[in-house]
Image (cartoon, rainbow, N blue to C red):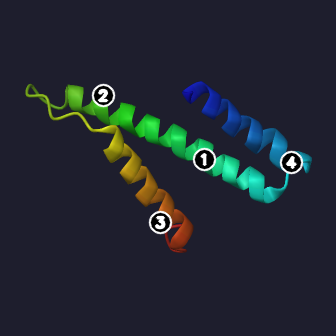
Amino acid sequence: MPLAATLLLVLNDHVLKSSGLVPGAITGKLSDFAGLFVFTLLLYVALDALTLRASSTRLRAPSAWGAALVTAAGFSLVKLAPPVN
């Protein structure tokens, strides 16, 4: 799934958007969906790797829900708050 989402993101951004074959509303949603999926996974993996090296007492590993929540909050800020965008 992560490779498929990454491939979709690259294909959409570099082929579909410039071809004009697919309406902009659809290519925009494809980018949003694939990007949110990939970023959530990357955030989860990065935070998990950081907690492994944090100290001798391992911090509690982040949850997938936590990574999804942080991703959703960041995405919402970018879309809704012009100064963040």
How far is the residue under mark 2 from the one under mark 4? 37 Å
Rate crowding at label 2 as few (under 14), some (14 to 19) or many (20 or more) other CA atoms within 10 Å: few
Is 43 positioned to the left or the right of 25 in the image? left
Q: Earlier in the sequence, mark 2 or mark 4?
A: 4
How far is the residue under mark 1 from the one under mark 3? 16 Å
Instruction: Residue 45 in the image: state x and y as whole percent.
Output: 38, 31
Q: Which residue is mark 4?
A: 18
Q: Earlier in the sequence, mark 4 or mark 1?
A: 4
Amino acid at dot 3? Leu
Is disc 3 placed on a helix, strand or loop? helix
Q: Which residue is mark 3?
A: 77
| Comparing labels 4 and 1, the label whose residue is closer to the camera | 1
How far is the residue under mark 1 from the one under mark 2? 25 Å
Q: Which residue is mark 2?
A: 49
Q: Quadrant of residue 42?
A: top left
How far is the residue under mark 4 from the one under mark 1? 19 Å
How far is the residue under mark 3 from the one under mark 2? 26 Å
Is disc 4 placed on a helix, strand or loop? helix
Name the residue furthest left.
Answer: 57
| In-front residue for pair 21/85 | 21
Q: Earlier in the sequence, mark 3 or mark 4?
A: 4
| Labelled disc at residue 33 | 1
Q: Quadrant of residue 2?
A: top right
Q: Image point 9% across, 25% down: which residue?
A: 56
Amino acid at dot 4? Ser
Is disc 2 placed on a helix, strand or loop? helix
Is 6 positioned to the left or the right of 59 in the image? right
Q: Image point 69% across, 35% down: which residue?
A: 8
Q: Earlier in the sequence, mark 3 or mark 2?
A: 2
Instruction: Residue 49 in the image: state x and y as whole percent.
Output: 30, 28
Amino acid at dot 1? Phe
Instruction: Residue 39 in the image: state x and y as whole percent.
Output: 49, 42
